[in-house]
Amino acid sequence: MSTEEDRASLSTEVSPQRHTSDGLVQVQVAAAEQRLTIGEKLSGRYRIERELGEGGMGVVYLVTDEQVVGETFAVKVLKEGLDPQALELLRGEVRKTRKLSHPNIVDVHSVNVDGSRLYVLMEYLEGKSLNALLDEEFGRGMPFSHAWPILEDVGAALGNAHDHNVIHSDLKPANIFVTNSGRTKLLDFGIARVSRGPLLQKRSGPLALTPAYASCEMLEGKEADRRDDIYSFACVIYEMLCGERPFGELSALEARERRAEVPSLGKLMREQNAALTKALAFKREARTRSVEELLAGLAAGKTPTRRSGTLIAAVVVALLVVLGLAYLKVEKFWLPRQVEVSAVPAFSPPRHSIAVLPFVNMSGDKEQEYFSDGLTEELLNSLAEINELQVAARTSAFSFKGTNTDIATIARKLNVGTVLEGSVRRSGNTVRVSTQLINAVTGFHLWSHTYDRDLGDVLKLETEIADAVAGALKVNLLGDEATKIELGGTRNPAAFDAYLRASKALNTQTAQSIQTAIAGYGEAIRLDPNYAIAFADRSSVRAGYPEAFLKDTAAIRDAFDKARADAQQAIALAPDLAEGHVALGYLFQRSLDFTQASQEYERAAALAPGSAQVLRESGRFAVSMGHFDAGLAAVHRAVTLDPLNPRSHYLLGLTLFLARRYDEALAAHAEAITLDSNHTAVYALRGLAYYELGNLESARASCETKPTYWASQLCLAVTYDKLGRRADAEAELAKIKAAGDGGAYSYAAIYAQWGGTAKALEWLETAMRLHNPRLQYAKTDPLMDPLRKEPRFQAIERDLKFPQ
């Protein structure tokens, strides 16, 4: 991609000398508005290929060097000239810049004159200026995780320059450039100031600068100091994070006169805001003294490394002594990420592993958030189809939505080596999706791209992005849009939009939101009757709805019948859709047809072995059937893929409870509660684990946390009985019995624990007559252990036809 003028240029403006009376010869550019044409040459050597852009100081072109085959440069042709003395000073500053030789500073080769033209020859970069990124992608500010790698790179460049007594003097977003490879470069050191002496001291006018980012001292014409660069850097950081300058349209002098204060940023912690405020102090003496100090205050736990030559040499020597390395590139120590000393154990995630973070909604309309979230989920599902790729589950990845958590922390929590993040800007029937793939271990960008599409083409976009990501990870993604359709997708943009809205509604698990989701999936199906994924998802919602919100037996039966029909239709439309087989397996399981359920789960696992949903549900089923090793392995794998989903840990706790591994179950429940303190069922199940361990007081305390939940009442009924509180136990049983015969299995469990074997068996037989779904746990439920030697119980087990 071509660069704009402010992306790869020296943009600090130096006014030309006008002293014709003292004999100085002016170098004037004739007719600044006249553009160089393609094919024209500078100094008979540099051929103009195309114009890259224009700024206030000059025009930038891409040129090829006709004396060196294959060499390309960016050339900035200044609109005005310099007198010979100033020209020599400028050339001297460029020579000093070249001596910095830093990977985060753009290479400037020379300042040249061609007739009436003055031009600067520099490195040609491909990418975007920070100015362009803020305008096009992050108008309301970047997430801190996006901003931090850029800040580190700019800090490395500034710190190195300051170590060599070079001051930038005009740091602003237009002079910060992010390349396509992910490295940030600092531009415009061509006329950098030197702290040990004034530059261009014979000039009559003030040094040109950008007032919005200039300190009070610079605006007052005082000699530049590294703390002036820090002020400018802080202005840039503030704008990166919120899209606004710290004092709005006011200059530093105007803000000081009005006694303005720096507004705190909600996305930063108190310590981070304090660090930014100190760097923006109006008085130099009160301002942050070094780049390292500023970054340390913003790092929230990270320690940016100083780049001084003495320290680098010491680190190199220490590493050579300790590690006995025969060869080590000193160049690597210029990058702050690679000289970190940390007590944290080495992070070694699976090689082909990825988390897809929620894409940022850049549309300026909160109501469009469902679209960016939905597109993220669809992309995540596409990547999950790759058997060789371990993909963090949606729930865990989305737990970081709206946070400022850095990429390294996210990667460690999700145990992934790469992170994909991006933004979505939707306007009418067009959409722009910007994506970037980050190596979570090194912090470097592996790949980035921006896609502009009509809304009708967005259905192809997820596969296109998935292909690109897979290629960057060196994994082959088989299939194309046609394959996606075969796997239950749609080509109908309106159906896709309705599907995304339905999925968004499920973020809140209320009766109303579930009904909204069911209606939304219905609309998607109406618009595209072959939309298999919509059928599968509606089936899952309908199957989970009755247990939580319906009491009437006929309504429950109707909901399950409709759920079954949806699952069967999903599979009829897309036989290889794993979600359809999971939905149908769950329904067979609840209807006590364990043979059919087993077949559906096995099919789903074969189709999507890396799906956390498939692993959770198939693992729970396997454990309930008595296949503890295989089932627990599957659920543990689901936790690995979806570690921040409380349901993952809850189901792990449930399966460990059924396997009689109660101490481990308690640990899983504790993790679930840490992730979601309002997860009602986990308190009941934790209480039952304590109960089985004989820790009755802990069992009571846990089950009393959510006392209105039916499973908590069951737990309290058996726990109170063991504590000798018989009346309280009877009262809890009475509460549950309000559900009528629908609670027959629970009554059987309570009576079994109370020692009422006859009543327990009677209620269990009632549960059989009613086909109570909870009978799926009869084979492994510890609460049923007192009945296992009873012939009537053994007859029930035979009738249930549990698989061997």
Image (cartoon, rainbow, N blue to C red):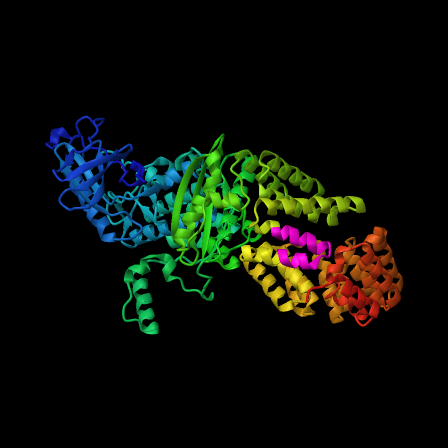
Q: Which residue is drawn at the image coordinates 21% and 35% (left, top)?
A: 77
Q: Give percent across and percent down for residue 546.
A: 74, 47
Q: Which residue is drawn at the image coordinates 18% and 32% (left, top)?
A: 17
Image-based side of 655 in relation to 695, left or right? left
Magenta stretch, main secondary structure class: helix
Quadrant (top left, top right, bottom left, bottom right) of the C terminus = bottom right
Residue 666 makes an appearance in the image: no
Residue 762 makes an appearance in the image: yes
Query: Foreground: 648 or 256?
Result: 648
Q: Which residue is drawn at the image coordinates 34% and 53% (left, top)?
A: 156
Query: Foreground: 558 or 745?
Result: 558
Query: Foreground: 792 or 677?
Result: 792
Image-based side of 644 in relation to 736, left or right? left
Q: Which residue is drawn at the image coordinates 55% and 49% (left, top)?
A: 398
Membership of 129 in magenta stretch: no
Q: Give percent across and percent down for residue 579.
A: 59, 50
The residue furthest left is: 23
Q: Give percent across and percent down for residue 521.
A: 62, 39
Which residues lie in the magenta part?
A: 581-600
